[in-house]
Image (cartoon, rainbow, N blue to C red):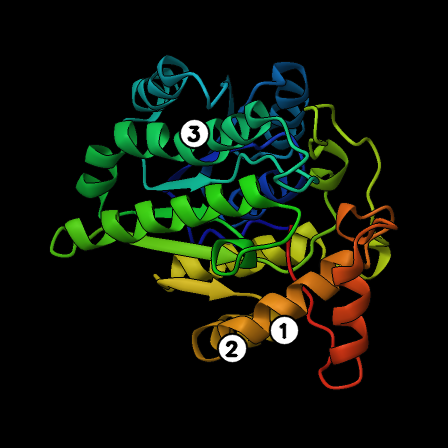
């Protein structure tokens, strides 16, 4: 893919850049002319990506970063400024999911999700903020429909994404007159490794995806929408019609959305919502399956 230089001279930091949406965003930004700073705990993988991009003539720098460690996030911004003198875009993509009901999950799992998804966003945004204001740049938070509607079996995930949205909405309001743009992006179900890395009730990664990923939105499609949103300084993007419907319906008929979400998530293989002793799923299925279309959401 040829560089089109529309973002020439821009510097973008992407967390969680070693795979999935983060990697796709890094490549899309580089293809459009931006210098990309790749952040992840997996420095080996980042270094391979850095070499791939620089070999093609793109500008890239890998910085080992654990977003749960505040000093790592501070170093990420510091290194970027030392190398390139500015930051135009910060994409808070690093994320972790879970798959368990609150009654089953160890609370350490919820804390871990908050550390990665929420505090990782807080730390990176905090230290990048003055540079982003100076550049009149953009902060991006990649959330999910789970950041608008509570997702059964994903209490910690939804909580962390709600927290991200509230935090970034506030940052936008605080900097209304500073030229800073804040974009909150909610993809649809995306074919990435987030479901394989999702934590189970005891904190062990589930290792396999509970869904057929062949028909899901690709990370590359999500990245194009996000980068276009940055260019056009969008406030928010909800990437599927089903997601838009869910957000709208939740405001008007919140109880209906609760029931639809319960039904949808209970259809996952081995769902904790659909155990033999859980009569709720069967009851809800019987009541609404024939009444409303199935909704599709992101995890």
For residue 53, what is the image quadrant?
Answer: top right
In the image, what residue occupies the spot 73% across and 41% down?
195
In the image, what residue occupies the spot 85% across and 56% down?
214
Q: Which mark is residue 99?
A: none
Q: Residues within 10 Å of mark 1 (few under 14, many from 20)?
A: some
Query: Which residue position holds label 3?
Result: 120
Q: Which mark is residue 249?
A: 2
**Residue 60 in sight in this render:** no
Element carrying mark 2: helix
Dot 1 or dot 3, earlier in sequence: 3
Residue 190, given in percent of the width and then of the height, sits at: 70, 53
**Callout in the foreground (1, 2):** 2
Q: Is residue 253 above or below residue 279?
A: below
For residue 285, what is the image quadrant?
Answer: bottom right
Q: Between residue 59 and residue 138, name the one nearer to us.
A: 138
User: Please, which residue is most extreme toward the left here?
Assistant: 177
């Amino acid at each position: 893919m040829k560089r089109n230089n529309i973002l020439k001279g821009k510097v973008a930091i992407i967390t969680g850049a070693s795979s999935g949406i983060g990697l796709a965003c890094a490549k899309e930004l580089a293809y459009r002319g931006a210098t990309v700073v790749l952040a992840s705990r997996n420095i080996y993988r980042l270094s391979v990506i850095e070499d791939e991009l620089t070999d093609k003539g793109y500008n890239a720098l890998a910085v080992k970063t654990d977003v749960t460690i505040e000093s790592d996030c501070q170093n990420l911004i510091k290194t970027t400024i030392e190398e390139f003198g500015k930051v135009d875009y910060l994409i808070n993509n690093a994320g972790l999911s879970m798959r368990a009901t609150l009654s089953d999950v160890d609370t350490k799992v919820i804390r871990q999700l908050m550390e990665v998804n929420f505090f990782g966003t807080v730390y990176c945004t905090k230290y990048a903020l003055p540079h982003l204001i100076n550049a009149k740049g953009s902060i991006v938070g990649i959330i999910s429909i789970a950041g608008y509607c509570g997702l059964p079996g994903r209490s910690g995930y939804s909580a962390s994404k709600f927290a991200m949205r509230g935090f970034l909405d506030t940052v936008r309001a605080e900097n209304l007159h500073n030229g800073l743009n804040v974009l909150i992006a909610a993809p649809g179900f995306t074919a990435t490794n987030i479901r394989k890395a999702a934590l189970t009730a005891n904190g062990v990664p589930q290792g396999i995806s509970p869904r057929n990923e062949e028909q899901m939105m690709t990370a590359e499609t999500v990245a194009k929408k996000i980068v276009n949103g940055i260019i056009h300084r969008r406030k928010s993007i909800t990437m599927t019609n089903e997601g838009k419907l869910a957000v709208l319906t939740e405001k008007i008929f919140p109880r209906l959305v609760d029931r639809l979400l319960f039904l949808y998530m209970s259809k996952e293989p081995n769902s904790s919502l659909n155990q033999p002793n859980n009569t709720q799923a069967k009851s809800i299925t019987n009541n609404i399956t024939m009444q409303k279309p199935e909704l599709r959401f992101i995890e």
